[in-house]
Image: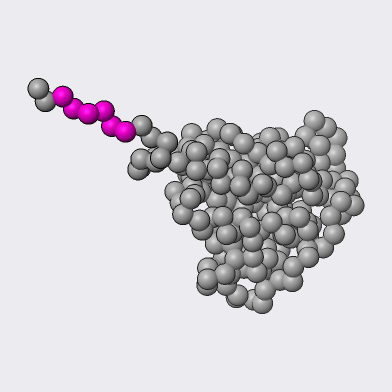
């Protein structure tokens, strides 16, 4: 799924051989600056949605994923310096607000700290990009080295990259490059509990009171 790719962040098969400098060199060779201007400080997204952002190491990411089990969870790996990443944020934000996927979870994981560090500059860039796109679901900024993230979450290399987990935390779908929104919508909806009959449901069997 998702044949278009954004910025390369390393090759999982040879992750141990890559230095961070080489990974960032590949990243900038494939991805230019974001195409959308950041929002002003303290801005809210579409509909007044407040952006939620925090730094997280790999253990914190794993704990967050575990805490969100029990429902389908869509996780998007992105960065503000990746044009395709920023360009797809409004579509993901809109999808997360749809009734069709109500009950599913959304989580963003930013890789911006690899370029601008673990300080206020990085948090501001991420928060502003999310607010400009109207993103209301939580986002974590990964704080750590490249290799543990790639190995720990089984990432293929390019971003944007998105994964859908089922309620038990099992990976059921993934998208390299901008995610196909209709595919994501169907995949999330398929994993939600069915609380009302649909046109595809057979009619209930008639009771025999003789």
Query: Residue 53 location, x and y as percent?
Result: 59, 61
Residue 132: tell me if it is visible.
yes
Residue 65: tell me if it is visible.
no
- Label count reads 0
The quadrant of the image that shows the N terminus is top right
Residue visible at 50% across and 56% down in the picture: 98
Taking the view exactly as shown, the residue that stands out farthest to the front is 210
Query: Residue 179 location, x and y as percent?
Result: 67, 47
Q: Is residue 117 above or below residue 173?
A: below
Query: Residue 87 location, x and y as percent?
Result: 72, 59
Q: Quadrant of residue 183?
A: top right
| 176, 75: nearer the viewer | 176
- Residue 44 inside the magenta-drawn segment: no
Query: Residue 35 location, x and y as percent?
Result: 78, 65
Residue visible at 26% across and 28% down in the picture: 205
| 133, 13: nearer the viewer | 133
Taking the view exactly as shown, the residue that stands out farthest to the top is 210
Residue visible at 65% across and 69% down in the picture: 132
Q: Is residue 95 above or below residue 128?
A: above
Question: Magenta span covers which residues?
Answer: 203-208
Q: Quadrant of residue 82?
A: bottom right
């Amino acid at each position: 799924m998702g044949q278009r790719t954004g910025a390369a962040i390393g090759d999982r098969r040879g992750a141990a051989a890559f230095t961070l400098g080489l990974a960032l060199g590949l990243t900038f060779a494939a991805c230019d600056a974001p195409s959308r201007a950041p929002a002003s400080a303290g801005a809210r997204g579409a509909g007044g949605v407040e952006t939620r952002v925090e730094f997280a190491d790999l253990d914190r990411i794993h704990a967050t994923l575990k805490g969100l089990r029990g429902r389908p969870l869509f996780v998007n790996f992105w960065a503000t310096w990746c044009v395709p990443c920023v360009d797809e944020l409004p579509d993901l934000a809109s999808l997360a607000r749809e009734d069709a996927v109500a009950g599913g979870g959304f989580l963003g994981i930013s890789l911006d700290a690899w370029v601008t560090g673990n300080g206020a500059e990085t948090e501001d860039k991420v928060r502003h990009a999310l607010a400009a796109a109207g993103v209301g679901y939580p986002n974590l900024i990964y704080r750590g080295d490249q290799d543990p993230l790639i190995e720990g979450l089984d990432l293929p290399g390019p971003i944007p990259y998105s994964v859908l987990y089922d309620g038990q935390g099992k990976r059921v779908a993934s998208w390299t490059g901008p995610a196909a929104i209709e595919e994501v919508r169907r995949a999330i909806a398929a994993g939600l509990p069915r609380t009302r009959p649909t046109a595809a449901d057979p009619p209930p069997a008639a009771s025999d009171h003789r």
